[in-house]
Image (cartoon, rainbow, N blue to C red):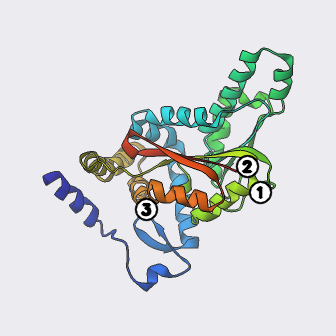
Amino acid sequence: MALQRTIRKLINSQNYLLPRGAAFLHSHATSFGFTEVNEEEKRKLVGNVFSSVASNYDLMNDLMSVGLHRLWKDKLISKLGPFPGMKHLDVAGGTGDIAFRVLESIRGVSHKAMHDSFAETEGQTQIFICDINPNMLNIGKKRATERGYTKNSYLHWVEGDAEALSFEDGSMDGYTIGFGIRNVTHIEKALAEAYRVLKQGGRFLCLELSHVELPIFKELYDYYSFSIIPTMGELVAGDKESYQYLVESIRQFPKQDVFAQMIVDAGFQAVEYENLVGGVVAIHSGLKL
């Protein structure tokens, strides 16, 4: 009970309670963490967050998740099942973490096959990394160069908005978005765009921080989120506010079953989700049939 009271005090003392009433229903109102802002302001604030954290993004991910984010991304790729010749779109993936895994998985398939036809098909592979933040894209390009990935033409870096993608209808075999969809202003628009750009039979996969339901674990997770993560952000990245937004944005994101229904409403079929670490993260998937 003492822990529960401490958590409530940490949350409420920040004056971040959601506003109520008609103002919240205004068509141009949205949330930035626990604060109500207009849509344009949210876009700028989210942009500022990721510009601020870009240089320490990988280090903070390792620290916050104790390295587990790497395993979560591996799990995502195993569900995707990349194949040679694939046209894949990774949205909000500026640092390249997921795109690099897609590429390595495709190379692994080709090398195991050991056939000239597979090698030729591999050469047709195209992986597009789309991110709205140029700072994140620059980090990814730098990492790609360090790994020697710039010697081929598989990777394509695109600055773009998840809610208004520049890709043609039915042009992608796969679509992934990792730890990004909770930051968009209109989730339903991002899902509609994902559906639009996928081919028939294309696969949608979303890896996102989600909701823990087990009471005891939830209390510990809330305490860690609101007390430890912002402090860690201040000490390591010199930016407490951005990581305060991070933990607030998770609580604002729809619960697993609600988000799954949003994916269904976007037109996807065979929609399902898998909780990892008790719901700390979840992988949602769907098919365009």
State left or right for residue 273 relative to residue 5: right
Closer to the N terminus: mark 3 or mark 1?
1
- In whole angstroms, how far apart are the C-alphas of marks 2 and 1? 9 Å
Neighbor class of circle 3 (other Cα within 10 Å; few <14, some 14-19, many 20+) is some
Residue positioned 77% across, 36% down in the render: 86
The amino acid type of the residue labelled 2 equals Val
Q: Is residue 73 above or below residue 212?
A: above
| Residue ID at (71%, 22%) | 109
Q: Residues within 10 Å of mark 2 (few under 14, many from 20)?
A: some
Where disc 1 sits, the SS reads loop
Q: Position of residue 134 (x, y in %)?
A: 65, 51
Q: Residues within 10 Å of mark 1 (few under 14, many from 20)?
A: some
Mark 2–mark 1 CB contact (< 8 Å): yes
Residue 58: percent from the left, percent from the top?
50, 38
Tell me how far mark 3 sits from mark 1, CA to CA.
Answer: 28 Å
Residue tagged 2: 158
Outermost residue on the bottom side: it is 22
Q: CA distance from mark 3 to mark 2?
A: 28 Å
Q: Nearer the viewer, residue 117 or 257?
A: 257
**Residue at mark 3:** 252
Amino acid under disc 1: Ser
The residue identified by callout 1 is 166
Lateral position of residue 127 relative to residue 39, left or right: right
Q: Amino acid at mark 3?
A: Gln
